[in-house]
């Protein structure tokens, strides 16, 4: 079963601890300090649209894309009451094509790690560069190799009244990927329905990403620690990037 086919319906309920507003506050601080005031934005790999909706509520005109039709269905339902909802499109990142260029592209919650082929990552950078207006900025984060390798052998449990989810992580050194085997139990009336998904995150080195961004045409690339206006520290678990187009 493909990633998020079953998990989409339960995703929001199992991720209530994700600090979307804190993340966006941090990214808007980067934008302000860089003198950027974007009006249009792409939420790349938007998932169930929680960040897309927050961007729209803060006044951005938003395009939101994802490869999962199931996640986009949830996102569109959530956006139904907004006066100016995001415009949702179903596309893989490496084949991104927008109806019009935007001022900023956001790609968050380690979505880039889900590109498990380095060639697809480089294609994505080129597509994002093309999707940005002159003077645009690309903001994204990754789970670091240190974090992904440290997950090897760990088991995680998420649950609420409607869902019960067990994550088992295994890092494959040969493939440079962390695999998550996900057993999901969802309430179906008086019974529980079981499904299984496997997710994979590639362990990208920050320096190689910076190099590929430069090759795509970005003139300045900055790296930050996890929601901190400082350079990443040794052993950082999550790193944010800001890449600027002339």
Image (cartoon, grey):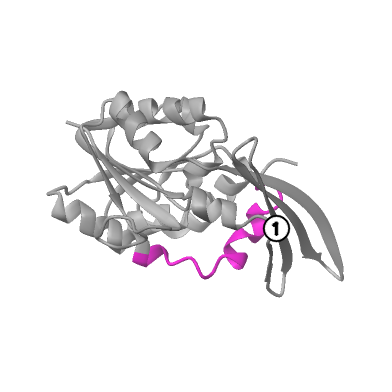
Q: Nearer the viewer, residue 1 or 192?
A: 1
- In this image, 122 relative to 228: left or right? right
Q: What element does badge 1 sit on?
A: loop
Q: Position of residue 225 (x, y in %)?
A: 33, 58
Image quarter of the C terminus: top left
Is 15 colored magenta in this rendering?
yes
Query: Picture coordinates of residue 112 (x, y %)?
Result: 47, 42
Up/down of 125 relative to 75, above or below: above
In which quadrant of the rendered view does residue 102 lie? top left
* Quadrant (top left/top right/bottom left/bottom right) for the N terminus: top right
Relative to 150, residue 160 above or below? below
Q: Is residue 156 left or right of residue 212?
A: right
| Numbered-mark total | 1
Which residue is found at the position 25% from the left and 31% from the top? 218
**Residue 158 part of the magenta segment:** no
Q: Residues within 10 Å of mark 1 (few under 14, many from 20)?
A: few
Image-quadrant location for residue 55: bottom left
- Residue 119 rendering spot, x and y as whole percentages: 50, 25
Side (left or right) of 171 relative to 225: right
Q: Position of residue 132 (x, y in %)?
A: 28, 32
* Residue 137 visible here: yes
Q: Residue furthest right?
A: 191
Magenta stretch bounds: 4-22
Residue at label 1?
153
State whether residue 86 is above or below residue 237.
above
Q: Is residue 77 visible?
A: no
Residue found 37% across the figure and 60% down from its top? 226
């Amino acid at each position: 079963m493909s990633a998020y086919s079953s998990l989409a319906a339960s995703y929001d309920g199992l991720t209530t601890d994700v600090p979307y507003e804190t993340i966006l506050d941090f990214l808007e601080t980067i934008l302000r300090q860089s003198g950027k005031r974007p009006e249009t934005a792409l939420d790349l790999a938007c998932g169930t649209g929680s960040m897309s909706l927050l961007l729209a509520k803060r006044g951005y005109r938003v395009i939101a894309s994802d490869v999962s039709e199931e996640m986009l269905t949830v996102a569109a339902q959530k956006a139904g009451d907004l006066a100016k909802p995001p415009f949702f499109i179903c596309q893989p990142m490496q084949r991104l094509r927008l109806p019009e260029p935007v001022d900023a592209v956001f790609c968050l919650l380690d979505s880039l790690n889900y590109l498990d082929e380095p060639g697809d990552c480089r294609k994505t950078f080129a597509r994002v560069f093309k999707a940005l207006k002159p003077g645009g900025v690309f903001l994204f984060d990754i789970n670091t190799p240190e974090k992904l390798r440290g997950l090897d052998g760990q088991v995680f449990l998420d649950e609420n009244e409607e869902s019960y989810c067990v994550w088992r992580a295994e890092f494959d050194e040969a493939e440079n990927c962390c695999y998550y085997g996900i057993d999901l139990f969802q309430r179906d009336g008086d019974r529980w329905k079981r499904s299984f998904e496997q997710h994979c995150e590639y362990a990208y080195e920050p320096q190689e990403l910076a190099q590929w961004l430069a090759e795509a045409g970005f003139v300045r690339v900055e790296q930050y620690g996890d929601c901190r206006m400082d350079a990443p520290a040794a052993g950082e678990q999550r790193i944010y990037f800001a890449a600027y187009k002339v």
